[in-house]
Amino acid sequence: MSTVSTLVVSGSVTGAGLALLLRELVPAPPRLGPALRRLNPPATGPGTTSSGPVASWGGWLVDRIPGPLPRTDLLLLKQTPEQFLLTKLGLAVSGLLLPMLVVAAWTLMGLGVPLFLPGLFGVIAAAGLWFVPDWHIRLQAGRARAEFAHAAAAYLELVAMRMASNVGASQALEDAAQIGRGWAFTRIQEALLRARTEKTSPWDALEDLSTQLKLPILADIADIMRLSSQDGAAVYDTLRARANSLRTELLAAESAEATADSEKMSAPGALLAVIVMIGVAFPAVVNVLYL
């Protein structure tokens, strides 16, 4: 790289550093989003709070990095926004530094590499790795919601069995939640316990949990049990019918997923067949050409 190019790059980096330093030193009005979250923090469950350096550094990132956060998915997976942003930042910094380490190793071996190449590939790698946690959280949240739907089908059956024993709607919900195991039933137990502590109705607690975590099946359960409580309606058949329809939906989704996976296997199979055909025909073609 020429002297002029080196001076231009150095000046640009120095100017960017000074601009960032002045931006942090000059007082600025607080952003509306973080201020509202501090005044009215979102509801969190047990195990979703962070402390120490994670809370301090992560809170600083939450207040300053623009763009929305997948708070609903993080709440479903019991992860904090601070941990999420620190993971994104760590991956981005790793992607930015990795090409420079490779170039440093090449330089020690005596291989000359232009200076702009590691910077270019580092920026591309950092930008790509920055969005990897978003994709991972979205994938995990989708799997968690599918798992919760399976648990909700069993929960509906358990509630229906308790309602058939002539117990109250609130008692049926709590008894059915205590029978089940797994994280989905644990979340339901936590919501019902919160409702009992705050002296609110359990179906309202289930509906709030459905809204927070985007689990529509809980809203359906809440509506059915609210109907039983207010009008004294017999909801056993309704609960069983909703459980059957939910199982049908889950089976259809799994069948569609299996079909999609089978179709994805057709391309590697066809490629393997082509490779085998080339391997079989190659000797004959070579013999024909050299005869």
Image: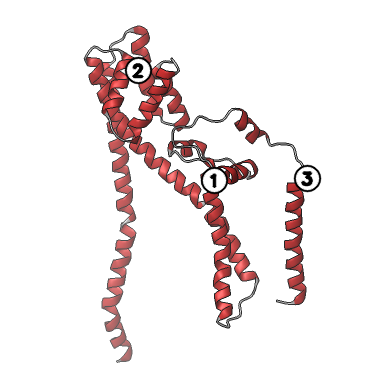
Q: Nearer the viewer, mark 1 or mark 3?
A: 1
Query: Which quarter of the picture shows residue 29?
Result: top right
User: What percent of the width, then of the height, locates residue 67?
Assistant: 61, 42
Q: Which element type, helix, strand or loop, lies under badge 1?
A: helix
Circles 3 and 2, Cβ within 8 Å, touching? The answer is no
User: 10 Å neighbourhood of mark 1: few (<14), some, or many (≥20)?
Assistant: some
Instruction: Identify residue for label 3.
Output: 26
Which numbered marker is on residue 182? none
Q: Which element type, helix, strand or loop, lies under badge 3?
A: loop
Instruction: Identify residue for label 1.
Output: 54
Instruction: Identify residue for label 2.
Output: 224
Q: Tell me the residue at 54%/60% (across/down).
A: 94
User: What percent of the width, then of the height, locates residue 170?
Assistant: 34, 16
The residue closer to the viewer here, 8 or 277, is 8
User: 10 Å neighbourhood of mark 3: few (<14), some, or many (≥20)?
Assistant: few
Q: Measured along the vertical axis of the image, is residue 1 above or below residue 81? A: below
